[in-house]
Image (tube, rainbow, N blue to C red):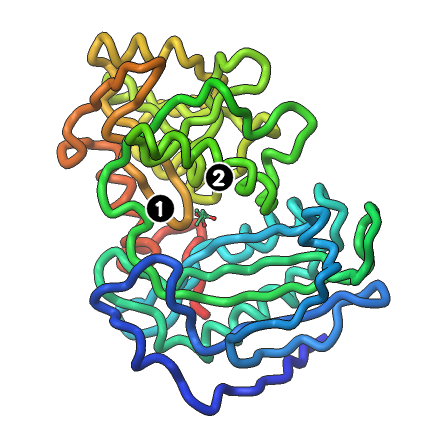
């Protein structure tokens, strides 16, 4: 059945306020947003309206009990000026995996994709074309019951808004292996893109920043023996320039869409890629022996975040010159070219809107 979306266009575009040459990540938002509300057991009244404040009750249950999840995806323009989304169906599926874990209703994929594509069509002029930039798309869902008490909310809102962005990390980052705090442990919600997973990381990453690090590498909750993910990305380690390792999906880490893209591309290129538990001690040994040829984070916002140095128990291990790295440079160039429609691929990752 066709999905009918009410559209109320902004009377005055704000696009002239955006300096497309100097975009700061996450600070400027496109003209419109998509919204649909869940009430009486179904998603109702989908609409596209001008981006702007929403009214909420002080007792909004998402704020108190944390039923809030989100996604991240990017839109690009090809050489013909058409809008392309990167792996939107995978994003819709992952949002529903997060929703299930958080006791929230799933959103029908057709509704998600229709709202998304109509929004992107309407705000297509906001897609930047400068090398490295994109229109970041932020779908999110939150509980809206006006109620105090711990139980799953009966009402929810789902919204998608967009912001033109540049690279999330403009330069290679310095990360610290975290041994005090824990992001997730067995049975928790580490695989979900739940707001609370990011909330609990604020203090640890703030403390790491004070020590001069850009990000953390989280370790397991039992003995801090194995690495998991970084604050905003999944992790990859390249040993002796040909063996690529990434922590396996054990329920504690996000099933990254960029992670999956990298694994697929690297296997196609002939690299050996192992998804397995990776010990902190192995990484430190590779660093000491000069065998860690490349190390990077992967994520929608960052695409590929090269790691310049790893801090562990007070020592910083410097990694090879980022400009010379084979694997991360190959991945960044290839993924970005696929995203902009410059390279044809047979996975149907890049979808015309
Ligand atoms: C993304 O990569 O899309 C994320 O959600 C990470 C966030 C830091 C922007």
Q: Residue at x 78, y 61 (%)?
A: 145
Secondary structure of the residue carrying numbered label 2 = helix
Q: Where is residue 268 in the image (x, y as percent from the top left)?
A: 35, 35
Q: Is residue 153 left or right of residue 257?
A: right
- Tell me the crowding category of disc 2: few under 14, some 14 to 19, or many 20 or more residues within 10 angstroms, Cα based: few
Q: Position of residue 270 (x, y in %)?
A: 31, 29
Q: Which residue is drawn at 57% across and 44% down?
A: 193
* Viewer-side residue, 343 vs 72: 72
Q: Position of residue 312 (x, y in %)?
A: 34, 16
Can residue 270 be seen here? no
* Viewer-side residue, 236 vs 302: 302
Examine the rendered structure and indicate whether residue 28 appears above or below residue 245.
below
Q: Is residue 283 left or right of residue 94?
A: left
CA gap, disc 1 and disc 2: 18 Å
Disc ID at residue 264 = none
Can residue 159 be seen here? yes
Tag 1 residue: 302
Residue at the far bottom in the pictured view: 11
First in sequence, mark 1 or 2: give its number.
2
The reply to whether the residue tagged 2 has its Cβ within 8 angstroms of ligand 1 is no
The reply to whether the residue tagged 1 has its Cβ within 8 angstroms of ligand 1 is yes
Tag 2 residue: 202
Q: Position of residue 125 (x, y in %)?
A: 35, 77
């Amino acid at each position: 059945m066709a999905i009918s979306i009410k559209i109320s266009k902004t009377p005055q575009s704000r696009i002239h306020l955006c300096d497309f040459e100097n975009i700061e990540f996450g600070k400027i938002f496109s003209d419109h947003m998509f919204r649909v509300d869940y009430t009486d057991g179904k998603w109702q009244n989908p609409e596209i309206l001008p981006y702007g404040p929403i009214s909420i009750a002080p007792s909004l249950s998402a704020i108190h009990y944390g039923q809030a999840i989100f996604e991240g995806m990017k839109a690009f323009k090809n050489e013909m000026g058409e809008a392309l989304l990167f792996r939107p169906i995978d994003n819709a599926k992952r949002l529903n995996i997060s929703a299930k874990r958080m006791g929230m209703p799933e959103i029908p994929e057709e509704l998600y994709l229709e709202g998304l594509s109509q929004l992107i069509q309407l705000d297509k002029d906001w897609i930047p074309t400068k090398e490295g930039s994109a229109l970041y798309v932020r779908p999110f869902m939150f509980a809206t019951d006006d109620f105090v008490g711990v139980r799953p909310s009966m009402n929810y809102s789902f919204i998608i808004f967009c912001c033109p962005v540049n690279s999330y990390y403009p330069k290679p980052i310095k990360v610290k292996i975290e041994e005090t705090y824990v992001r997730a442990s067995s049975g928790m919600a580490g695989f979900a893109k739940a707001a609370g997973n990011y909330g609990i990381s604020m203090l640890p990453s703030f403390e790491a920043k004070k020590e001069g690090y850009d990000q953390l590498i989280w370790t397991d909750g039992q003995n801090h023996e194995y690495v998991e993910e970084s604050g905003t990305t999944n992790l990859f380690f390249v040993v002796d320039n040909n063996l690529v390792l990434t922590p396996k999906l054990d329920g504690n880490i996000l099933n990254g869409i960029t992670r999956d893209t990298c694994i697929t591309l690297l296997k196609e290129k002939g690299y050996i890629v192992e998804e397995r538990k990776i010990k902190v001690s192995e990484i430190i040994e590779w660093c000491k022996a000069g065998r860690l040829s490349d190390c990077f984070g992967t994520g929608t916002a960052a695409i590929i975040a090269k790691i310049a140095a790893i801090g562990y128990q007070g020592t910083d291990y410097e990694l090879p010159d980022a400009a010379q790295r084979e694997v991360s440079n190959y991945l960044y160039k290839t993924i970005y070219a696929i995203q902009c429609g410059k390279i044809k691929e047979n996975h149907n990752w890049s979808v015309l809107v």
